[in-house]
Image (cartoon, rainbow, N blue to C red):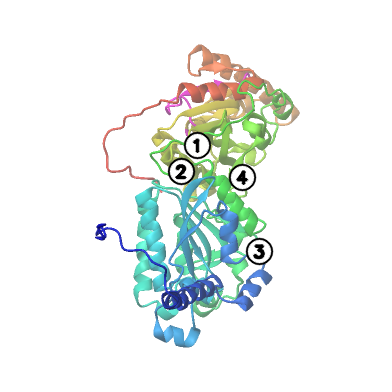
């Protein structure tokens, strides 16, 4: 007789009855309806209003940001869970915060996207619980954190409860995440109060022209507190923060451009600080000569030119991702690749103030150097710097303190550092732009390079002052000054520095690309040991 015993791990199989199938249908239908309602966000009317303002709905933004089909949402069925709020405001889809993990170029990122169609994207208790989950996940899994910001800030209706505490934890945790995983805050709408500090603590902040703004107090609060009548754009729009305050890094035309900028930015970064930056294959020859530089850079030291043209000539495929291009324009910062290797570039801009460094440019460069060093991105310095701005006005602004900030950052950086001196390298400008004493791994100079305490014109005014005073004012004195300056210029000839082995090579400008790649290659295994310390004391 056959053994009819059924093994304990295997249930008997039989056809599901009509009754069993019927019992599942309402449950599945209910789940489907709930998910559909959540995906509908604030509803058709508010979505239409979002579009009328030139802004995309939050889920369409995620489609642009992330690789197709890669998004895994967390907490889609979340609600405010506040009976009183529900009575007055109704259903709040996902509590106004769409959160999850997706991929950008095949690499995972944690995303927190505020939905302005749901109670103006305000920070609710449940929504902030979801953002805390994403921050924890980003840190635990060591993946970048990306905020898509379009929020009215803290939800006043819940501000005395868990939401207020959650916002405080957010800022502290951002500080913990800083330098561990890349953090991006894409400004896609108005952000006030609580959400305004998210970009302040992030690494990269692009803003959409005309639709995004950030301020510690919205215009209604400002009017109530100060009586000042001001629009969101005037108080904290993209023009303010990309050109005046320096809080934001890039101004773009629309949501799509903003989200594409996020993808481009992250392509230069590792997922976390223990990884190497991602290498990208290129067909651009490493030894490509750049003879266009002969026409771009004048040999006359006082004639201006555009350093952006130099950068685009020497980097892989002419691609350069500028950071803060409209703020402190006398120094250029941004990302490029050499031989497929991501690098951060710090360059003088002779077109603006002759490339002289001031308070804002020192801050801009210092922050950029710290960012690159945190994520092991090598640094390339392109020098044509007359030094720091002088005068009573900049001393009152604290030029010494701000210059020390840049000096501190460059000194502290342990990544490979390559320096090219195109023309001027005067005084402390030479130091903060990674001169000889700052652990530069390779220093190449052009035949037009001048490395000195100051330029010949300044030298004449100091060491030849008495001789000049003995000559009558006018053309005769001006001619004498020029002659003296040219004589002194012979003492800062680049071959004198090369003769003292203060620089590693004098190169043909057309070989600049090849020289930089050689410098990056020889310094690839760089290790710098520092004395133990909890942290330095920053001159901020």
Residue 440: in magenta span: yes
Image coordinates of residue 200 in percent, x first then y, are 47, 57
Mark 4 or 3: in front is: 3
How much space separates mark 2 and mark 4, taking CA atoms? 19 Å
Any part of residue 459 in sight: no
Mark 3 or 1: in front is: 1
Query: At numbered mark 2, what does the secondary structure look like: helix, strand or loop?
Result: helix
Q: Which residue is mark 2?
A: 371
Q: Which residue is mark 1?
A: 278
Q: Earlier in the sequence, mark 3 or mark 1?
A: 3
Mark 1 or 4: in front is: 1
Q: Which residue is rendered at x = 48% and y = 68% of the image? A: 97
Work out whether residue 22 or residue 52 is closer to the camera in this orientation and state it: 22
Q: In the displayed structure, would residue 11 be above or below residue 139?
A: below
Query: At numbered mark 3, what does the secondary structure look like: helix, strand or loop?
Result: loop
Assign the N terminus to one quadrant of the image: bottom left
How much space separates mark 1 and mark 4, taking CA atoms? 28 Å
**Callout 1–callout 2 Cβ contact below 8 Å:** no
Of the numbered discs in the image, which one, if any, rests on residue 447?
none
How much space separates mark 3 and mark 1, taking CA atoms? 34 Å
Which span is picked out in magenta? 432-447
Q: Which residue is rendered at x = 24% and y = 57% of the image? A: 3
Q: Which residue is mark 4?
A: 329
**Callout 2–callout 4 Cβ contact below 8 Å:** no
Q: Which residue is rendered at x = 48% and y = 64% of the image? A: 196
How much space separates mark 3 and mark 2, taking CA atoms? 28 Å
């Amino acid at each position: 007789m056959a053994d009819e015993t059924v093994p304990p791990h295997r249930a008997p199989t039989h056809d599901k009855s009509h009754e069993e199938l019927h019992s599942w249908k309402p449950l599945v239908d209910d789940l489907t309806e709930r998910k559909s309602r959540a995906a509908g966000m604030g509803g058709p009317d508010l979505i239409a209003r979002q579009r009328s303002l030139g802004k995309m709905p939050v889920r369409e933004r995620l489609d642009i940001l992330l690789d197709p089909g890669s998004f895994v949402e967390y907490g889609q069925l979340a609600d405010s869970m506040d009976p009183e709020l529900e009575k007055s405001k109704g259903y709040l889809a996902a509590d106004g915060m769409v959160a999850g993990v997706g991929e950008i170029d095949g690499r995972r990122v944690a995303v927190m996207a505020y939905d302005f169609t749901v109670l103006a994207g305000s920070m609710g208790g449940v929504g902030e619980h979801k953002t805390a989950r994403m921050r924890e996940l980003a840190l635990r899994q060591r993946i970048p954190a990306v905020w898509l910001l379009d929020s009215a800030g803290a939800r006043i209706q819940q501000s005395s409860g868990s939401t207020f505490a959650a916002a405080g934890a957010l800022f502290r945790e951002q500080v913990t995440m800083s330098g561990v995983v890349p953090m991006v805050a894409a400004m896609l709408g108005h952000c006030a109060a609580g959400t305004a500090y998210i970009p302040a603590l992030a690494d990269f902040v692009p803003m959409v022209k005309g639709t995004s703004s950030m301020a510690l107090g919205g215009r209604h609060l400002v009017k109530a507190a100060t009586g000042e009548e001001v629009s969101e754009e005037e108080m904290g729009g993209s023009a303010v923060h990309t050109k005046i305050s320096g809080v934001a890094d890039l101004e773009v035309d629309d949501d799509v451009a903003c989200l594409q900028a996020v993808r481009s930015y992250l392509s230069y970064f590792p997922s976390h600080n223990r990884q190497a930056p991602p290498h990208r294959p290129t067909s651009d020859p490493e030894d490509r000569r750049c003879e266009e530089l002969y026409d771009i850079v004048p040999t006359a030291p006082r004639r201006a030119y555009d350093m952006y043209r130099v950068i685009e000539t020497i980097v892989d495929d002419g691609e350069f991702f500028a950071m803060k291009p409209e703020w402190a324009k006398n120094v250029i910062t941004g990302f490029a690749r050499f031989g497929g290797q991501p690098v951060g570039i710090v360059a003088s801009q002779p077109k603006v103030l002759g490339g002289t460094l001031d308070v804002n440019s020192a801050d801009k460069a210092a922050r950029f150097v710290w960012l690159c060093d945190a994520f092991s991105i090598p640094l390339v310095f392109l020098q044509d710097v007359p030094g720091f701005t002088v005068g009573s006005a900049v001393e009152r602004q604290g030029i010494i303190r701000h210059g020390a900030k840049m000096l501190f950052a460059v000194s502290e950086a342990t990544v490979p550092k390559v320096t090219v001196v195109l023309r001027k390298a005067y005084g402390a400008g030479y130091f903060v732009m990674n001169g000889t004493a700052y652990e530069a791994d390779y220093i190449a100079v052009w035949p037009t390079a001048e490395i000195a305490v100051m330029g010949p014109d300044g030298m004449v005014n100091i060491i030849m002052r008495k001789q000049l005073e003995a000559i009558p004012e006018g053309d005769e004195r001006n001619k004498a000054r020029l002659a003296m300056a040219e004589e002194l210029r012979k003492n800062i000839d680049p071959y004198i520095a090369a003769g003292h082995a203060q620089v590693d090579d004098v190169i043909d400008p057309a070989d600049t690309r090849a020289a930089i790649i050689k410098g990056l290659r020889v310094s690839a295994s760089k290790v710098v040991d520092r004395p133990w310390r909890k942290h330095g004391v920053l001159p901020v």
